[in-house]
Amino acid sequence: MKWERFSCLKEKEVINICDGKRLGFVCDLEIDTHSGKICTLIIPEDGGKWNFFCKEQAYFVPWRCIKRIGDDIILVEVDASDVLVTDE
C-alpha cells in the first residue's frame, strides 16, 4: 500500500476521465471521524481559494469516484454538474 500525505494530494491536478476536464487541485478533504477514512475531495472551481469568507463554487468529489492516483494527477469519474456545489 502506498501512503500519501495531504500536502502531496494538494499538488496533484484532478482530471475527470468522463470529459477530460481539469477540475483543479485539491484544497480540502471531508473525513469520516468514526472510521478515519476520507469521504470527499474538495476542489475549488477555476483555481479559486476556498475559505469560510468567500462565496465560491467547489467540486465535492466522493472518494469512490477516484479511479487512479498517479505521481502528478488524480483521475476521477464523475458528472461534473452533479458534484459542483455553491457555497451560499
Image: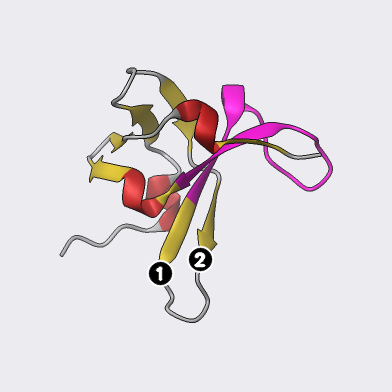
Position of residue 54 in the picture relative to residue 36 (left or right): right
CA–CA distance in space, label 1 to label 2: 6 Å
Graded by Cα atoms within 10 Å as few (under 14), some (14 to 19) or many (20 or more), the crowding at tag 2 reads few
Say what amino acid the circle numbered 2 marks.
Answer: Ile
Element under label 1? loop
Instruction: Name which residue lies at 35% across and 28% down.
Output: 15
Q: Circles 1 and 2: CB distance less than 8 Å?
A: yes
Instruction: Name which residue lies at 80% across and 35% down.
Output: 55
Instruction: Name which residue lies at 52% across and 37% down.
Output: 83
Position of residue 51 in the picture relative to residue 37 (left or right): right
| Color theme of the render | secondary structure
Instruction: Name which residue lies at 31% across and 24% down.
Output: 18
- Highlighted magenta segment, given as a residue range: 41-61
Q: Position of residue 74 (x, y in %)?
A: 31, 38
Say what amino acid the circle numbered 1 marks.
Answer: Lys
Marker disc for residue 31: 2
Q: Which residue is mark 1?
A: 37
